[in-house]
């Protein structure tokens, strides 16, 4: 939590790291020590007063800071975001603040470059989504392995065609987790269950620290592999590699059979294990097949047995780099890089083209790597990136349980049992994400877009909050429409986000502010203290009705709450014109006018929602950095840390130079040092 301890450390660092002389409040040149004494000494260091367990006397040189780079990064954040010094302390002049932030940033970059190290890519297993995709690609299955409710958008009529670089004007889509009928599709029957993986609180379901492998799960993977190849639906019609892998050879001569087995296993295992299989491993798998054939089992069943063993092997379901064998990080070899790239963009194993480039030792070449990323961005398997990243980034699973009060919002519910506006709301931000990606538009459209995809229901919702025609519950018709009202457009003000960050009967500005801080700015607040007082009644006895801001005043008065509220309150109250179901309002039910004004990052005053968007766009590099950090975390399967600072600097610079285009950002992620080491 950001509170007074950070104030003292921030101003204390002025003594040690100011770039040059700074200006005192009276305009005279002053030594940093004067600013340090002015802002902090009276609470943190004078007369043995050490509030917040932070002693300024312990930070007296740059060496002290270079050993605490995480602290330096946090200091930069609280200073640059305007959180420190707090409102009840004399502010720093803009020139002072900028000088200190610049020096801290220089110190951080120099120290990181000198260390020349990266967090090691954690070893982890595939999650269920990745396992489904990998098995499907390995066997070229025309059916699914599992039903996957974690894929929140169901595509109809194959509208997703990234090779065209264009999304259609009209399309049909549905939502898997909001209707059982949405999960009815061709898949393998009789396959053993694989539990859905949990998402990290501020991360994704591919995070290594969430993908452990217990002995019980290992045993279940062995059973799972057998159930896949033994399914009645696993046959010549559904399995694309059946003719060249499972079909018996014309000859029954033992030498020819052995040659056939080995020639079929080598490319299969290379694809399954994502690198050339060595002779010892090939011998072991071939011996398994030949032994079963010798015992009287058919050729096809013997090959099924070895295929089941392959997809139950740690070489298949574990994701790891060869560099993990050493204590120090190093450049990944081409096969590691191919695997990392394919799981990033396709959620699956590399295809033959990617493995061939890796085998030629060319994938490490930046130009070749860029070519491969561009090829993968044009492939329909990019659909899997859209199935996985955006819903988790936006935390859209929260809309599933949103139930606005039926008395206040009857238009949210429809006569058909269990049918709500939720499905329409959920799909709009996902379709916007897909369009910005496929058409390589600016990621700033996520903040303020001039178009959207809407159903008849959503058109009525945004127009006047009435109950539009929901259409069929299975295949919802969406149309691409222009957005001219800047109160709408983008992700932040979508009906889905506004509804899922509200309670049943009213908005929750703190929840909304925390969502914007976490998702849009990638700066999640600390959890609130356990003893936070409840909001005061809206109106007590014969007093005048209280505006929502006044009802939250008690939280800001607490020292242990004030720091976080300074950060998230402006973000949440800026969205107050949208009610608990995402419908625009100018006044509350009690007649009081909605006040959406505030100050962003301690420097940008805004009057209303549109002005708030303008101020966010004025900080477009801050948003780009936060979004890039989300993407990098997803790509690496780990939390992004201070060692990734230089890489994020470069990613943001290159993306900005390309007008913030989405595909440029993805290419820069793939070219970044953390991704390639």
Image (cartoon, grey):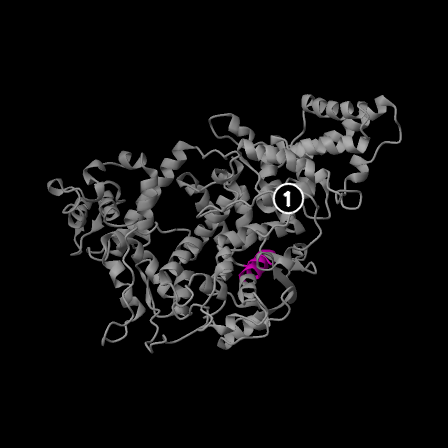
Question: What secondary structure is the stretch in magenta mostly built from?
Answer: helix
The magenta stretch spans residue 418: no
* Residue under the image location 36 percent in, 63 percent down: 509
Picture layout, residue 205 above or below residue 292:
below
* Residue under the image location 32 percent in, 76 percent down: 592
Residue 488 coordinates in the image, percent (x, y): 48, 69
Q: Label 1: how many residues lie within 10 Å, few (<14), some (14-19) or many (20+)? A: some
Is residue 274 visible in the rendered image? The answer is no
In the rendered structure, the answer to whether residue 372 lies left or right of residue 493 reads right
Picture layout, residue 193 above or below residue 458:
above
Closest to the observer: 668 or 257? 257
Is residue 112 visible in the rendered image? The answer is yes
Closest to the observer: 306 or 609? 306
Residue 446 coordinates in the image, percent (x, y): 49, 60
Which span is picked out in magenta? Answer: 429-441
In the rendered structure, the answer to whether residue 355 lies left or right of residue 486 reads right
Q: Circle 1 sits on which residue?
A: 132
In the rendered structure, the answer to whether residue 464 lies left or right of residue 89 reads right
Residue 92 coordinates in the image, percent (x, y): 23, 54
Closest to the observer: 158 or 528? 528
């Amino acid at each position: 939590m950001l509170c007074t301890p950070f104030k003292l450390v921030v101003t204390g660092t002025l003594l040690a790291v100011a770039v040059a002389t700074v200006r005192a409040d009276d305009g005279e040149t002053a030594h940093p020590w004067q600013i340090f004494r002015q802002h902090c000494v009276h609470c943190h260091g004078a007369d043995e007063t050490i509030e917040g367990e932070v002693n300024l006397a312990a930070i007296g040189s740059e060496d002290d800071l270079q050993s605490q780079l995480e602290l330096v990064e946090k200091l930069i954040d609280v200073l640059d975001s305007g959180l420190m010094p707090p409102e009840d302390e004399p502010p720093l002049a803009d020139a002072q603040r900028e000088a200190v932030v610049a020096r801290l940033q220089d110190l951080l970059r120099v120290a990181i470059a000198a260390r020349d190290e990266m967090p090691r890519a954690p070893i982890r297993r595939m999650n269920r989504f990745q396992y489904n995709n990998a098995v499907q690609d390995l066997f070229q299955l025309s059916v699914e392995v599992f039903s996957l409710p974690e894929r929140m958008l169901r595509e109809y009529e194959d509208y997703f065609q990234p090779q065209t670089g264009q999304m259609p004007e009209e399309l049909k889509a549905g939502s898997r987790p909001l209707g059982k009928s949405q999960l009815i599709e061709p898949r393998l029957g009789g396959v053993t269950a694989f539990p859905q993986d949990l998402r990290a609180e501020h991360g994704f379901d591919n995070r290594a620290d969430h993908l452990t492998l217990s002995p019980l799960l290992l045993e279940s993977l062995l059973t799972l592999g057998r159930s896949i190849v033994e399914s009645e639906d696993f046959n010549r019609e559904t399995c694309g590699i059946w003719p060249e892998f499972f079909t018996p050879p014309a000859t029954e001569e033992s030498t020819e059979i052995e040659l056939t087995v080995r020639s079929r296993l080598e490319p299969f295992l290379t694809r399954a294990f994502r690198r050339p299989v060595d002779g010892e491993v090939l011998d072991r798998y071939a011996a398994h097949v030949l032994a079963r054939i010798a015992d009287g089992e058919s050729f096809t069943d013997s090959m099924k047995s070895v295929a089941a063993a392959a997809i139950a092997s740690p070489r298949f379901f574990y994701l790891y780099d060869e560099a993990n064998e050493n204590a120090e990080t190093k450049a990944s070899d081409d096969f590691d890089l191919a695997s990392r790239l394919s799981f990033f963009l396709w959620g699956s194993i590399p295809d033959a083209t990617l493995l061939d480039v890796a085998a030629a030792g060319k994938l490490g070449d930046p130009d070749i790597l860029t070519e491969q990323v561009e090829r993968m961005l044009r492939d329909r398997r990019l659909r899997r990136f859209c199935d996985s990243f955006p819903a988790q980034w936006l935390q859209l699973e929260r809309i599933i349980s949103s139930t606005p009060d039926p008395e206040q919002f009857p238009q949210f519910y429809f006569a058909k049992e269990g049918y709500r506006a939720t499905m329409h709301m959920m799909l709009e931000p996902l379709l916007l994400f897909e369009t910005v990606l496929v058409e390589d538009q600016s990621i700033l459209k996520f903040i303020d877009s001039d178009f959207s995809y809407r159903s008849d229901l959503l058109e009525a919702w945004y127009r006047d909050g009435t109950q539009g025609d929901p259409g069929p519950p299975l295949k919802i018709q969406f149309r691409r429409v222009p957005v001219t009202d800047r109160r709408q457009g983008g992700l932040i003000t979508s009906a889905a986000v506004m509804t899922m960050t509200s309670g049943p009967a009213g908005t929750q500005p703190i929840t909304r502010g925390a969502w914007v801080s976490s998702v849009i700015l990638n700066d999640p607040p600390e959890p609130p203290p356990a003893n936070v007082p409840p909001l005061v009644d809206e109106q007590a006895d014969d007093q005048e009705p209280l505006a929502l801001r006044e009802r939250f005043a008690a939280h800001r008065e607490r020292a242990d709450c004030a720091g976080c509220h300074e950060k998230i309150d402006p973000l949440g109250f800026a969205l107050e014109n949208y009610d608990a179901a995402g419908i625009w309002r100018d006044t509350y039910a009690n007649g009081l006018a909605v006040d959406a004004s505030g100050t962003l990052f301690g420097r940008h005053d805004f009057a209303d929602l549109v002005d708030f968007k303008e101020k966010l766009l004025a900080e477009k590099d801050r948003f780009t950095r936060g979004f890039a950090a989300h993407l990098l975390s997803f790509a690496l399967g780990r939390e992004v840390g201070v060692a990734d600072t230089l890489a994020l600097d470069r990613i943001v610079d290159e993306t900005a130079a390309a007008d913030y285009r989405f595909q440029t950002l993805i290419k820069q992620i793939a070219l970044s040092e953390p991704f390639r080491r």
